[in-house]
Image (tube, rainbow, N blue to C red):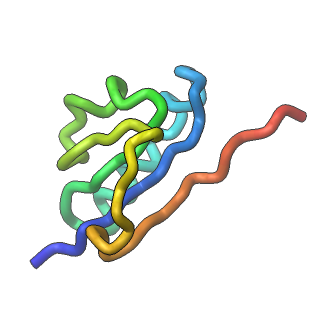
Amino acid sequence: MAKKVLIRIDTPALGDTLCSTPTVRKAFQSYGHKLYIQSGRPDVFERSPYVEEVYHINDKLNPKDFDEINPLPRRTAL
């Protein structure tokens, strides 16, 4: 059985969310199965072939429902 891996993308900006899509693809390739995504812009990932299910960043999720949770660091202004 495949591990349930959640990737948290905690950025409200559309551009930053779009920039995270190659990371999601690479994680899919590394794990070898679809991922679960939690994002402030879930619409970006709804039709992704690498994603099993998408949640909004404000959704309350039970960490025990996932085998692994990987937050992507929030980008800060320079």
The N terminus - image quarter: bottom left
Q: Position of residue 24 (x, y in %)?
A: 39, 48
Residue at the image position 32 percent from the left and 65 percent from the top: 5
Q: Position of residue 33 (x, y in %)?
A: 19, 62
Direction left: furthest residue: 1
Q: Quadrant of residue 12?
A: top right
User: Against 47, is 28 above or below?
Assistant: below
User: Against 43, is 55 above or below?
Assistant: below
User: Against 54, is 63 above or below?
Assistant: below
The C terminus - image quarter: top right
Residue at the image position 38 percent from the left and 36 percent from the top: 56
Q: Position of residue 59 (x, y in %)?
A: 38, 43
Nearest to the observer: residue 56 or residue 70? 56
* For residue 36, side relative to residue 20 (left or right): left
User: Against 38, is 15 above or below?
Assistant: above
Residue at the image position 51 percent from the left and 44 percent from the top: 9
